[in-house]
Image (spheres, rainbow, N blue to C red):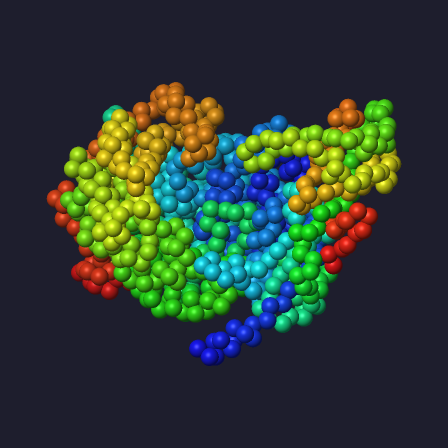
Amino acid sequence: MKISQIVDEILPRVSKPTRYLGNEYNSIHKDLTNIKTRIALAFPDLYEVGMSHLGIKILYHLLNKYDDIYAERVFAPWVDFEEIMRERQIPLFSLESRTPLTSFDFLGFTLQYEMSYTNIINMLDLADIPLYSKERTSEHPFVIAGGPCAFNPEPLAEMVDFFVIGEAEEVILEIIESYKKFKKTGKERQAFLEEVSGIPGIYVPQMYDVVFNDDGTINRYIPQKPGIPQKVKKRVIRDMDQVYYPTDFVVPYMNIVHDRAMLEIFRGCTHGCRFCQAGMIYRPVREKSVNRLYELAKEIIASTGYDEISLTSLSTSDYSDLKNLIKILTEEFETNKIGISLPSLRIDAFSLELANKVQEIRKTGLTFAPEAGTQRLRDVINKGVTREDLLLSVSKAFRCGWNSVKLYFMIGLPSENQEDLEGIASLAHDVIDVYKKINGNTRGLKVTVSTSTFVPKPFTPFQWECQISLDEIKNRQKILKKLLKNRNITYNWHEAKLSFLEAVFSRGDRRLGKVLEIAHKKGCKFDGWNEFFCFEKWLEAFKEAGVSPEFYIYRRRSLNEVLPWDIIDAGIDKQFLIRELKKAKKGIVTPDCRVNNCHACGIKKIVDGGFCESKNEI
Amino acid sequence: MLAELKRSWMVVFVKVRMKFEKGDEVKYISHLDMMRTFERSLRRAKLPIAFTKGFNPRPKLTFSQALPVGVTSSSEFVDVEFNEKVEIDDVICRLNKYLPRGFLVKYADFCNNDFPLHMLNCAKYIAKIAINKNSQIDIEKVISNILARKQIIIEKQSKSRKRLIDIAPLIYDIYIKEFKDEICLLCLELSIGQDGNVTPEMLISILNENLERNVSILLINREEMYLREGEKITYPL
Ligand code: SF4
């Protein structure tokens, strides 16, 4: 029986069958006879999570513009579906044409968060594709991966044939071009890997030998052949108005996590928060023009019929002409009741003025991210929010009639102490006081405090730091629970054990591949989902692989240690990161380089000729 | 001010009732997802939908009773309000162009408020079922037994709790339309809406129990929906 028929039989028996239909409005169905290259775009999580992710959508529509390329989607099937697949021996298949993944030329994973790595392994297993790159033959697709976690590709180095570092819109086409030529030659798989290792932005891990020191740290990377780059430079799109952007997005039937049109307004961020990886790896800041955005917005609404358009970026408030953009968009969409939402908007007087026009704030309430409880620690992490800013915005908001506020913090930041924890609580209580002053009482007020645990990330000034111990995480959460006991406050915290694993994998090296393989064998998958996460299995996996997680989490790296991700050039100068780390230790802030001087982060050197829209030169 | 008043007077609300098909491609789309799909399709078709007033304006759409997930239908209804005059043919043509494949508006007409869709209380289904050859039991007999029963208590799972209901008064008719080579076309006329809901699956599972679990469902299609008052039948369109 064909896969398609079996799937039809299965669908009535699984939860949310719409996840597997593949025939949503604007989904692309091609006649296979003219297709030369087939690529499966995979997101290692459920449909509703993956379909909320912009990167995979851009690539899907970009690739499908070409008549001889067919890109299809594949997501991690939910456990009930997986069970039947295994029972009936159906290999993992693409959504659109229900073709087994082994029939594709490429299988491309998006690496959005470390805790999805076991899902990647599970998907390879379900697809009958050998886990290790070395074991694959001409029968198998090339397994490639990109996305933010590809900036430290090492934990997956032995499983992924090659990584795409940085923005993929241009390089993905170069890869396919090169593949077409390779196919004609009829050469071995290895020949293609050698070929692509010469394309800027491509990292082929098996082309490098990694030499380790006796203490377990890395001695060096040795390219196996001449011509293979010493460092792989990330790819950057130069002109955001010229770069392809889809308008005919697939419109899901089911209610997904972000169920609305997405309009990317710019890339990059220069606030320079010292814990934040996105703020470093997506530099430089590049905006789309108001005109281009206006045209795109109209087309997107016309072709999708969404009733909401979300302006996405790392920090919406930083868009230079935000006021004008919003004015133009609200005028255009008012009559058709199409809402505009501005996630990651900094709340201040200006944004409150916008708030009436903007759905996101109305729906989700106000969110603030001071990240740390005291000014001292906020200076250490370079988060430019003051208590006064926060309370002023909150009081304005309360006066406008809001009564719910969310505050986001991180615990375990370098140098955090008792005072900083108390600071978190006192900020929350200050917010309550402001409300009391304005309304006379605290009726209806809801303050939600959420803490995540600091995870040191590659390419940040804190990349050499450690995470606090599991016990210490629990201890600090306990302290906060006590300090935040108040009927107006709800306190949420991130699972400590997950942060622990994130800390291992975000700065891990090649030896972790074995751990992933064993963890998967023990049944780890969907680790980000409470009901599946099993820490004990992970600890066993570390033990069996002979890898100590503590080595990765609790060891402060020396500044001259060779780091696993040193093989990647993210455009950020190590010297800049060291300068920032030193400033952090002294509590000196580094102002945003878009309004201040350039701090020579290094990004200008990455592209020939160099470019950075920030006007101020050193 | 005056101009605005005048404008709001002139707003004419036009209500159009449509009969549409929900085919195989979209039979797993839930009622809620289908509502969103229609809203989006109307917007893509650039039809002048009217919105509810208030804080969170919603398009004015009213659907007939939810179809069970997995069941196709040749007879679903939706009332759509427009804030401008529209041409029926134009609405049908444009909407069909922008609906996902599997949905098809077959017929539409202006309507007033005399016969709101929630008054529909009866639906007719055709179920294609396979009955294992080994089954010695006569299905005709089983059906007439079911129809003769005064009370049929079944357990119904609603959101959080289970409750027992009597579905005997909710069954209008069951008969065999065709029976050839193990394949049986079953016609079921069942109550929907406020009086109580019985799904064709519920009945088929009762049949299955009485036929020693030899029945499997191949297809179910909703054929018609109407208001039934005794023997009198009124169609919504
Ligand atoms: S090059 Fe200078 S101005 Fe540009 S992002 Fe880096 S620090 Fe800022």
**In the current view of this chain or complex, which residue is farthest to the bottom?**
B2
- Left or right of A285? Residue A48 is right
Image quarter hosting the C terminus of chain B = bottom right
Q: Please name the residue shown 32% across and 39% down the image.
A: A490
As displayed, is residue A301 above or below residue A451? below
As displayed, is residue A129 above or below residue A26? above
- Left or right of B171? Residue A25 is left
- Residue A551 visible? The answer is no
- Residue A618 visible? The answer is yes
- Left or right of A527? Residue B193 is right
Q: Please name the residue shown 52% across and 73% down the image.
A: B8
Residue A478 pos. (x, y %):
26, 30
The quarter of the displayed image where residue B100 is located: bottom right
Residue A282 pos. (x, y %):
33, 52
Which of the pair B84/B44 is nearer the observer?
B84
Which of the pair B74/A534 is nearer the observer?
B74
**In the current view of this chain or complex, which residue is farthest to the left?**
A586
As displayed, is residue A522 above or below residue B157? above
Residue B227 pos. (x, y %):
74, 51
Q: Please name the residue shown 62% across and 42% down the image.
A: A99
Q: Please name the residue shown 47% across and 43% down the image.
A: A49
Image quarter hosting the N terminus of chain B = bottom left
Residue A380 pos. (x, y %):
18, 44
The quarter of the displayed image where residue A7 is located: top right
